[in-house]
Image (cartoon, rainbow, N blue to C red):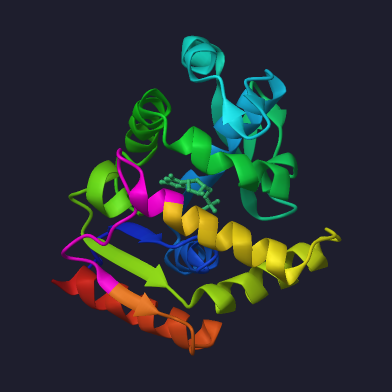
Amino acid sequence: MAKRRLTIAIDGHSSAGKSTMAKALARELNYVYIDTGAMYRGATLFAMKERFVLNHQVDEESLVESLDRLFLSFKYNPATETSEMHIGGINVEKEIRTLEVAKNVSLVAKIPAVRTKLVALQQRMAEGSGVVMDGRDIGTVVLPNAELKFFMTADPEVRAWRRLRELKEKGKETTYNEVLENVLHRDKVDSERAVAPLKQADDAVVIDNSNLTMEEQFEFMLNVALKRMET
Ligand code: DC
């Protein structure tokens, strides 16, 4: 019997390893992977380039008025085997991963009009099944009917060490304290914002991966998905 293709939502705290797991699951199951964090980062980069973000303050009115000019899309790059973020057709995958963007993204992600635009786009991208989408509000707002929802977390210190290692590997100069501060700040803003705050869906499978290896975690998630396909 052919296995049922699922829509899988993965939410959780920043730097909890959501995208690594989402990508691995999508590859294993031959599903499409959609990184919604990249979309909020794209919107933030756009706001920064348009000079709507100055000294960590957003000129919300100007940004909202300009949202019609924001064209976000993913294009698959076979060389990196990932779908890379583009703004108006220009590849910005590297730029959206900088700490500067990370520092401003929560400010932009809490603007209701930004969320409305991106959620609509995400829902269109997820039409049809065989999708893994990761973010903060996927199981609660974007895809509340997803057949499988995960909520991933880990201790903030563990997440900061992992993120620091990642940034160092990419040659970015930063310190553990700076990264920890950013992780804690994003947890706070993501959880406390008025619109679509980060929270666990009631029917999510919760994974605290502080003491799990990637392999252990992947095996666990894959098994849950395979079982769900049979129900
Ligand atoms: O997953 P990430 O770190 O790339 O996400 C970047 C930021 O975008 C994060 O600080 C919270 C925000 N975000 C959001 O508000 N809603 C989502 N669905 C995904 C990300």
> What quarter of the picture does the N terminus occupy?
bottom left
In the displayed structure image, the side of residue 213 where residue 133 appears, left or right:
left
> What quarter of the picture does the C terminus occupy?
bottom left
Q: Residue at x 33, y 67 (%)?
A: 151
Q: Is residue 190 depicted above or below 70 in this figure?
A: below
Q: Is residue 223 depicted above or below 69 in this figure?
A: below
Q: Residue at x 35, y 49 (%)?
A: 192
Return the residue nearer the eye: 62 or 25: 62
Magenta stretch: includes residue 193:
yes
Q: Position of residue 184 (x, y in %)?
A: 52, 62
Query: Is residue 143 visible from the viewing direction of this image?
Result: yes
Q: Position of residue 155 (x, y in %)?
A: 48, 78
Q: Residue at x 25, y 44 (%)?
A: 141
Q: Quadrant of residue 180?
A: bottom right
Q: Is residue 56 depicted above or below 197 in this figure?
A: above
Please report the bounds of the magenta region as a residue range: 189-205
Magenta stretch: includes residue 211:
no
Q: Quadrant of residue 80?
A: bottom right
Return the residue nearer the eye: 2 or 61: 61
Q: Is residue 182 depicted above or below 40 in this figure?
A: below
